[in-house]
Image (spheres, grey):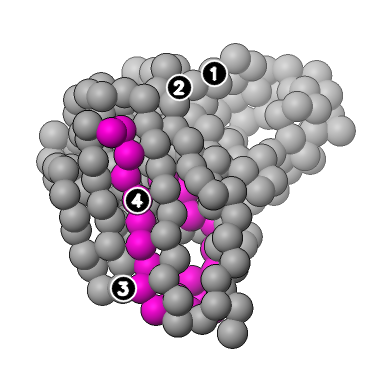
Amino acid sequence: EAAVTQSPRSKVAVTGGKVTLSCHQTNNHDYMYWYRQDTGHGLRLIHYSYVADSTEKGDIPDGYKASRPSQENFSLILELASLSQTAVYFCASSDDWGSSQNTLYFGAGTRLSVL
Amino acid sequence: QQKVQQSPESLIVPEGAMTSLNCTFSDSASQYFAWYRQHSGKAPKALMSIFSNGEKEEGRFTIHLNKASLHFSLHIRDSQPSDSALYLCAVNTGGLSGKLTFGEGTQVTVIS
C-alpha cells in the first residue's frame, strides 16, 4: 500500500513562532496535498502541488506557505503561528489525475497545538 | 470556489439497516466524485469513487451520481458497528484538476 509519512506526529508551538511540518511519500506520486482538520469537521485544502518546485494555493492558504523541493517531499510552513492554526494537519499524495486512479493516500496526521 | 455540502450532519442507524449519505457540489465541470471514511483518531481512507453518471456498487457500498442535479450519494447496505465513522465526500474542481475539496462530513453511528 502507498506510504505517506508525516513528521512530527504532534507539536506544541508558541504564538508567533515558526512551525514546519514535513511530509515524505514513497509512492512515486505526482500530486501532494496539505489539509487541515478541526475537531469533528471535514478537511480543508491549504496548498497542493503537482510537480517539484511548484505549489498551488488551496482554499485556505492565508498564513501558510508550502515547499516541494522534490517529488517525495512536501513541507508546510507557518511563519507566525497563531492560536487559530491549532488543528490536525494531514498530508496526502495521489497519482496523475489523467488516469483513473485518483485515490488520495493520507499520512497519519500531525496534531498541532499553538499556545 | 467549489462548494461541497453534506447531509445529514450526523446519523444513528441500527445494525443491519441501510445508511444513506448525501453530497452536493457547485462546480458543474467536476469529474471526480469520491467517498472517504475516517475512524476516530485515524487518517481518512478512500472507500470508492465514480467518474460518470449512474451507479457503482462494491460489496455493501453503492455510490449514485447525478451530475445534472449536482448531487451524489453513498448507500451502505447491512450496516455494521465497524461502519461507525466520519464519512467525507470529495469532489475535484474543473475537469481533471487535482484540486480536491471535501465536505464537512457526516458522523455515522451504528448501534447494535
Q: Which residues are magenta?
A: B69-89
Q: Quadrant of the N terminus of chain B?
A: top left
Crowd band around label 1 with a 10 angstrom C-alpha radius: few (<14), some (14–19), many (20+): some
Question: Helix, strand, or loop for circle 4?
Answer: strand
Q: Is residue B12 visible?
A: yes
Q: CA distance from mark 2 to mark 4?
A: 25 Å
In the rendered image, residues at marks 4 and 3 fall on the same chain = yes
Q: Chain of mark 2?
A: A
Residue with the mark numbered 2: A58
Q: Looking at numbered disc 2 in the image, what kind of residue is underneath it?
A: Gly
Marks 4 and 1: CB-CB under 8 Å?
no
Mark 3: few, some, or many residues within 10 Å (few <14, many ≥20)? few
Answer yes or no: are tags 1 and 2 on the same subunit.
Answer: yes
Amino acid under disc 3: Arg
Circle 2 or circle 4, nearest the eye: 4
Q: CA distance from mark 1 to mark 2?
A: 6 Å
Left or right: A100 in relation to A114: left
Q: State the separation of the CA atoms marked 4 and 1.
A: 29 Å
Q: Choose mark 4 or mark 3, whichever is in front.
A: 4
Counting from the top left corner in percent of width and height, residue A112 is at 71, 40
Disc number placed over residue A61 in the picture, else none: 1
* B73 inside magenta stretch: yes
State the mark number for residue B73: 4
Front residue of this view, candidates B15 and A104 = B15
Q: Nearer the viewer, mark 1 or mark 3?
A: 3
Q: Is residue A45 left or right of residue A85?
A: left
Q: Secondary structure at mark 2?
A: loop
Disc number lying in front (4 or 1): 4
- Circles 1 and 2, Cβ within 8 Å, touching? The answer is yes
Task: List x then y, in percent, for residue A37.
Answer: 60, 40
